[in-house]
Image (cartoon, rainbow, N blue to C red):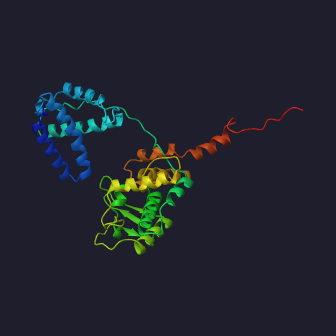
Amino acid sequence: MKKAVRTDTALDALLTKYCQNLEVRNYSAFTIRVQRIHMSYFNAWAAERGITEPVEVTRTSMEQDRHHVFHCVKKNGEPLGFTSQKNRLAPLRTWFRWMAREHYILHNPASELELPRTGYRLPKAVLTAEEAESILSQPNIGDAIGLRDRAILETFYSTGMRRSELAHLKLCDVDTERATATIRQGKGKKDRHIPLGDRAALWMKKYLTEARPRSTDQTVFLSNAGEEMAVDYLTELVREYVNQANIGKKGACHMFRHTMATLMLEGGADTRHIQVMLGHADLKTTQIYTHLAIRQLQAIHRSTHPGARVRTERTRE
């Protein structure tokens, strides 16, 4: 027997209106798409239980959905992490608050919905300077693609920019002579001006003058077809070079972001400078990297803790 196709409900219609409201308020297309996906999970769960109107949603049903999300599993059979659970539930509070403000409902049933506690998790892999150099040396710079890829890796390593920011980087926003770049409409639709670093600027200039295909597209890094590169393609490209380096660590674009921040902190950079480089809205997000800059802590530990150093014991004659 075929599974019945679910028809749109009043909740679905309000979800569409809410997403249109976010669009008018200048939220990014990515944010709107993600929020729609998360809230569609709730609508599907509610429809299965005969809840189709916003006025039918109660605090009890919201709590039942929270327990349902807790017991959800991913495609590989593993349970949803607490961060994933929070990402699925948090938009509901904002959505129902909007419904109450727009008088689609009298009261907000999600006002007291408790979200899972997540805490901070350190990045799984951060490169040493030696490991980063090993990865950077993998592309074959004797051909156009290898030269492009070397410039991409150098840019990730030097700036820590997000993969979407690198994919959308335009020619007019790069100054290889001054070794600077402007990130347009980064996360939160905010612009920022950052240093490229002299070495990354040199590799980018070499790519632009010797290897970039002729194209009307003004994006800096182009695919073989002369088009803007997809972010997923960037991930696979960087991951392949990481694997080729055989350093015993796995990762891709974001690993270079973590590495840039950690190495700069270990080199003495102020956390606020790292915040500007990464485009973090909140300094607390940047401060997680202070936990990764372990070398400074090790040096202090060795110099101040009497039991930290290995001492040579004199043998009795």
- Residue 309 x %, y %: 70, 39
> In percent of the image, x 51 and y 42: which residue is there?
291
In the displayed structure, does residue 256 sit left or right of residue 56? right
- Residue 56 x %, y %: 12, 29
Indicate whether 147 appears above or below 241. Answer: below
Q: Quadrant of the N terminus?
A: top left
- How many marks overall? 0
From this viewpoint, which residue is outermost toward the front? 1
In the displayed structure, does residue 293 sit left or right of residue 238? right
Indicate whether 45 appears above or below 299. Answer: above
- Residue 292 x %, y %: 51, 44
Answer yes or no: is residue 162 visible: no
Q: Quadrant of the C terminus?
A: top right
Choose top left, top right, bottom left or bottom right for residue 120: top left
- Residue 273 x %, y %: 46, 55
> In percent of the image, x 41 and y 66: which residue is there?
145
Residue toward you, 224 or 63: 224
Answer yes or no: is residue 122 visible: yes
In the displayed structure, does residue 44 sit left or right of residue 123? left
